Image (cartoon, rainbow, N blue to C red):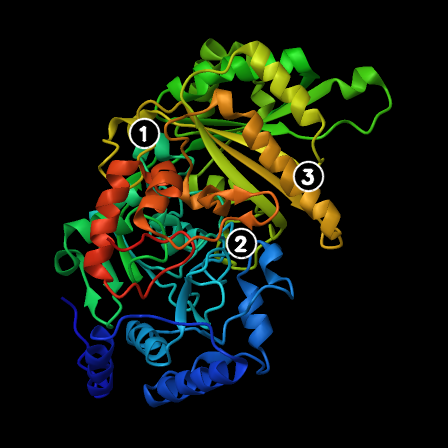
Amino acid sequence: MYTNSSPTSLLLGILSILLSTHPHVIASQSPRDNGVRARSLSTCLLASGVRNFSMAGSPGYATIFDFSIQNLRFAAPGIRKPEAVVLPTSRRGLQRAVLCARSASLAIRVRSGGHSYEGQSYTVSGGVLDGKAPFVVIDLMNLNKVRVHAASATAWAESGATLGEVYHAVAHSSPSNRSSLALTAASCSTIGLGGHISGGGFGPVSRKFMLAADNVLDALLVDAVGRVLDRRAMGEDVFWAIRGGGGGSWGVVYAWKLRLVPVPDTVTVFTPRREGSVDAMAGLVYRWQFVGPALPDEFYLSASLTIGSSSSSSQEDRDLRNVAFTGLVLGPKEMAMSVLNERFPELGLAEAEVSEMSWVESAARLAGLSSVDELTSRVSKTKYYGKNKSDYVQRPISRDSLAAILRYLSDGPPAGYVTMDPYGGAMARLSATATPFPHRAGNLYALQYGVTWDSDAGEASVSARIQWLRSLYAYMTPHVSSNPRAAYVNYIDIDLMGFDESLGPVRLASSVSHARATWGAAYFTVENFDRLVRAKTRIDPANVFYNAQSIPLH
């Protein structure tokens, strides 16, 4: 176990003892009560030596709070804001932030990158347990150090580091800057490492090297009473739980020890787009279903479908659809062209569409950046207003059904999309119970549905787009997994709690039975969910760390 031996540890110790004996129950409070809590938090932080925080209403508060919000839907005036944002700069400061928040009877949200699709790392929406609770956001953006040990192919990375910062540090641990080491994780560079790993962490090299969570060797977890626990101290059940069991349930992971993976000096990237009739594009996607998940482990080939009809008045033009592909091959372009021309000649991949580069250059390219140095920027270029949902496909969808789906999409809004990520490879060879992330053998690909809107969209327009997305999700029911209908927890979806057309997401207390039957089974399977409940009950018996879809207590 890691301990705090600073001169101020007496204060932390007293707070730990007091808080460990009192359940975490926060009732709805009046503005006056909230003001008292906020002053209590400020006093405690200052007494503990924490200076880097901003209280609601103070200069700079809005800028700090809004900076990491990626889905601007949750930056709107009607969304409840925290009483304070605390930005710890050290492990000790993180401990103090947790203890002071508890001392002030404030609920805690922990934000590493702000990419939660439902804003659960910085809001209190979606469920009676936290619907009106005063809360504080502990933002980890200043805890972003990455220490690479190339000789052992490992790295310690703080949870507030973005994926781009980790990729950049790993690549530049080699003097040649053409690193033979990489981290397996997602393509978006501003995603926070802590949140990504907590949901599993799928990315373009997962078919070769599994998930980010599968490559965690150790972690340092700050629990509800301020202790810092490594893998041995937290125990294997909790260590298992934090690697894919969802964020906001266990404590705050200060840092992760990561296994880095070997990649060739040269990789191949291609992003071809194909356009044709509905029937032709249905045939292309139909064939992709048999190819993408069955390619050699070194290959990643995703497909994205365009939603919305053409603006042309010509019926012929309106019947045209396009499919965008994204490919990454851990090897030279000759290898990529040879395999794809043999296994997927329908794609018609041309040499001019293929580029060779280093792995870190591919990370920047797939993130939509113009240079490797941009990987270290936390300024997101992809902020949006939107709603997302997810599915898994376990049997190929027929060509006729795909044509019908494409025609259905033609009636959708032009700012919607469907992304198809191939599974299989190494990640499918690991047991569904090895980590809480269960979507391995038997899944051909993951589906992500999304719809976005502009900042000036009216309430009726926003409502219509969200309703259309839910209708699409319902339309896909016969074609996706069932019993349970699976979902990816990193694409968190409040709708899975239950949905009423007049009330929106059902606001139910997170009982074990309700959670298991709805989102618990969808994200984790019943077996994994029940193990997560046991781990939650062990590490956080006072339920200090909770949100609308956090793991409930036994």
Answer above or below: position of 280 versus 328.
above
In the image shown, does 104 or 231 lie closer to the viewer? 104
Where residue 371 sits in the image (x, y, percent)? 55, 48
Could you classify mark 2 by the number of other residues whose Cα lies within 10 Å: few (under 14), some (14-19), or many (20 or more)? some
Query: For residue 265, which numbered disc appears in the image?
Result: none
| Horizontal side of residue 543 vs 203, given as left or right | left
Q: Quadrant of the N terminus?
A: bottom left
* Residue designated by label 2: 374
At label 2, the amino acid type is Glu
The Cα atoms of the two marked residues, 2 and 1, are separated by: 33 Å
* Residue designated by label 3: 415
| Horizontal side of residue 118 vs 307, given as left or right | left
At label 1, the amino acid type is Arg
Q: Secondary structure at mark 2?
A: helix
* Residue designated by label 1: 440
| Horizontal side of residue 18 vs 392, given as left or right | left
Where residue 322 sits in the image (x, y, percent)? 66, 23
